[in-house]
Image (cartoon, rainbow, N blue to C red):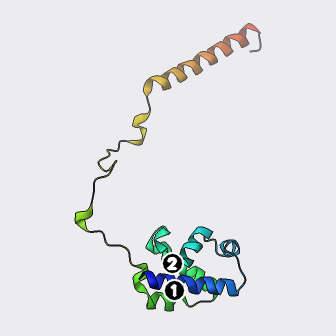
Amino acid sequence: MAQALKEVGEEFRHRRKEMNLSLKEVENSTSIRAAYLQAIEEGELSRLISPVYAQGFVRQYAAFLGIDSEKIIKEHPEIFNKKVVDSNDFSYGIGTLETRSHPGSGVKAIPNAVWVIGFVVILIVAWLLARFLEVI
């Protein structure tokens, strides 16, 4: 599989250089980050977000370069297969047993009450000042 990835990546790099394009130019044309394009060319699809993104990026990059993406996917289906995780390999990491609460549960009533009381006091003072100055 690693050899197939390298071959596909070399084909992409060769075609890009034939077209006299930099990774930045391809990035601007395809909206695929240069780091992802470089990962494809180096045959390191594991650096991409997921196998689904890898397949989409390869399709889009191949179409841009004029390469038959369907042929690549049919010839090398193992490249895009998602890694199967063995159930025995599951490990409990930090946050695995994290409890989640209601989104508003962090709101405290006392600070909110202080703000409301402060606002009401300011309104009363403004009203009294306006009456004293005979504005109202």
Q: Which mark is residue 43?
A: 2
What is the secondary structure assignment of the residue under circle 1? helix
- Please state, as top left, top right, bottom left or bottom right, where the C terminus lies in the image: top right
For the residue marked with disc 2, what is the amino acid?
Answer: Gly
Q: Position of residue 6 (x, y in %)?
A: 50, 82
Residue 44 seen in this snapshot: yes
Residue in the picture at 45% in, 91% down: 75
For the residue marked with disc 1, what is the amino acid?
Answer: Glu
* 26 left or right, relative to 37: right
Q: Which mark is residue 19?
A: none
Which residue in the protein does label 1 denote?
A: 7
| Number of callouts | 2
* 106 left or right, relative to 117: left
Pointer 1 and pointer 2: residues touching (CB < 8 Å)?
yes
- Please state, as top left, top right, bottom left or bottom right, where the N terminus lies in the image: bottom left
Question: Which one is earlier in the sequence, the residue at label 1 or at label 2?
Answer: 1
* Viewer-closest of 4 and 99: 4
Q: Residues within 10 Å of mark 2 (few under 14, many from 20)?
A: many
* 121 left or right, relative to 19: left
Residue in the picture at 35% in, 44% down: 100
Residue 33 seen in this snapshot: no
Can you say whether 47 is above or below 11 in the image?
above
Q: Position of residue 129 (x, y in %)?
A: 71, 11
What is the secondary structure assignment of the residue under circle 2? loop
Can you say whether 75 is above or below 136 in the image?
below
* Viewer-closest of 3 and 8: 3
Residue in the picture at 42% in, 35% down: 106
